Image: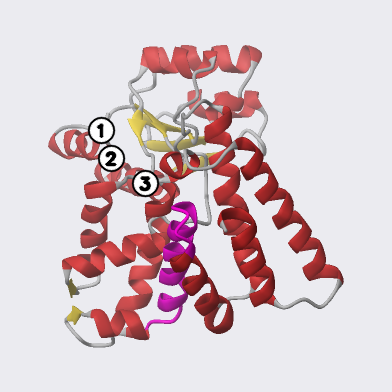
């Protein structure tokens, strides 16, 4: 179920006693929980409890869920990483979910949407999961527009695309960057290209994804030009090693999985436009070439830590080693 559908149902009627969120976008999880809290408690005192299996024993979690008082007080429980409960505690949780208390609301979260283990399958038979993965494409644009609207700012459509390129790896990151841009723009009612260019980090971030796209496409001329600009004006080689390593690792994973790209593997230090082209990029490289590139990056990392080297020379030699 889409999160928008779940929230609409909630606002149109009553709050359910049980919700199961699957997907690793922390902003969406928090956004949904805040909406549940607002509709559920209304004018009542908010009684919200966060429960994490790493910090609490399973019995304590079940005891809190099933405890009642004379006044049937409203309580909201958030159970993070519910799949960590094992044995009798897991059975007790399933039993509770089949007949939850009417005065309590339980919101369970699981970060891995792709999880198909026994716990996930069994819980999905009881309650339909709500998708809290980081959205892409038009859905991400809708959220960007919403964040600008929240800040009382109008924005050009082309700048929405740029913001998503810059910070679209998660909604939390996108929202934070939009808030920063809005603060930077001062009292202006609309955001334009100049506001974005003046915003700290814009040039560096944009050139980085352009550089990675050129490298993945094996466009030697553009890769060298962008690489030289980045390394002499905006970045150090150390700051590029992490996204470069991530890019080649992901391409190798695609090769090892026979062309299948596992979405939502968690945080990646590369922009959405680069990430979605990884399967396409991987087709232009052999496994041996990808392994060689990763090995070369490891050697650069060692040299950066043990001796003086020229960042520009190291980067150009890496580019030539990989696609030259």
Q: Which residue is mark 2?
A: 40
Q: Position of residue 268 (x, y in %)?
A: 52, 51
Dot 3 or dot 2, earlier in sequence: 3
Q: Is residue 38 above or below residue 205?
A: above
| Direction right: furthest residue | 306
Question: Which residue position holds label 3?
Answer: 28
Report, in whole angstroms, how far the alpha carbon at label 1 lies from the one at label 3: 18 Å
Magenta region, main secondary structure: helix
Q: Is residue 312 left or right of residue 228?
A: right
In this rendering, the answer to whether 260 lies above or below 301 is above
Residue 181 lies in what quarter of the image? bottom left
Q: For this rendering, which residue is in front, 64 or 153?
A: 153
Q: Position of residue 158 (x, y in %)?
A: 21, 67
Dot 3 surroundings within 10 Å: few (below 14), some, or many (20 or more)?
Answer: many
Magenta residues?
199-220
Circles 3, 2 touching at the beta carbon (< 8 Å): no
Q: Marks 3 and 2, Cα distance to the nearest angstrom?
A: 18 Å
Is residue 96 shown to the viewer in this render?
no
Depth check: give the residue in front, 78 or 297.
Answer: 297
Residue located at (50% from left, 79% from top): 229
């Amino acid at each position: 179920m889409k999160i928008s559908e779940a929230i609409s149902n909630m606002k149109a009627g009553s709050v359910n006693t049980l919700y199961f969120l699957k997907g690793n976008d922390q902003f969406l999880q928090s956004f949904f929980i805040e909406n549940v809290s607002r509709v559920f408690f209304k004018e009542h005192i908010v009684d919200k409890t966060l429960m994490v299996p790493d910090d609490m024993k399973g019995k304590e979690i079940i005891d809190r869920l099933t405890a009642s008082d004379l006044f049937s007080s409203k309580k909201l429980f958030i159970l993070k990483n519910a799949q960590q409960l094992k044995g009798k505690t897991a059975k007790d949780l399933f039993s509770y979910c089949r007949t939850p208390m009417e005065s309590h609301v339980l919101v369970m979260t699981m970060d891995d949407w792709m999880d198909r283990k026994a716990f996930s399958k069994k819980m999905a038979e009881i309650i339909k999961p709500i998708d809290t993965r980081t959205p892409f494409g038009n859905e991400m644009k809708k959220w960007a527009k919403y964040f600008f609207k929240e800040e009382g700012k109008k924005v050009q459509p082309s700048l929405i695309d740029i913001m998503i390129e810059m910070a679209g790896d998660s909604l939390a990151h996108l929202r934070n960057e939009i808030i920063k841009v809005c603060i930077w723009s001062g009292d202006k009612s609309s955001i334009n290209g100049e506001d974005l260019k003046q915003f700290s980090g814009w040039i560096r971030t944009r050139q980085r994804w352009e550089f990675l796209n050129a490298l993945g496409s094996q466009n030697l001329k553009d890769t060298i030009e962008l690489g030289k600009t980045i390394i002499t004006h905006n970045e150090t080689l150390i700051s590029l090693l992490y996204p470069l390593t991530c890019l080649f690792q992901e391409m190798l994973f695609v090769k090892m999985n026979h062309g299948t790209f596992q979405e939502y593997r968690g945080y990646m230090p590369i922009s959405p436009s680069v990430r979605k082209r990884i399967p396409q990029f991987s087709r232009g490289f052999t496994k041996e070439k990808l392994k060689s590139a990763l090995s070369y990056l490891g050697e650069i990392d060692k040299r950066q830590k043990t001796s003086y080297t020229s960042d520009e020379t190291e980067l150009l030699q890496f580019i030539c080693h990989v696609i030259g």
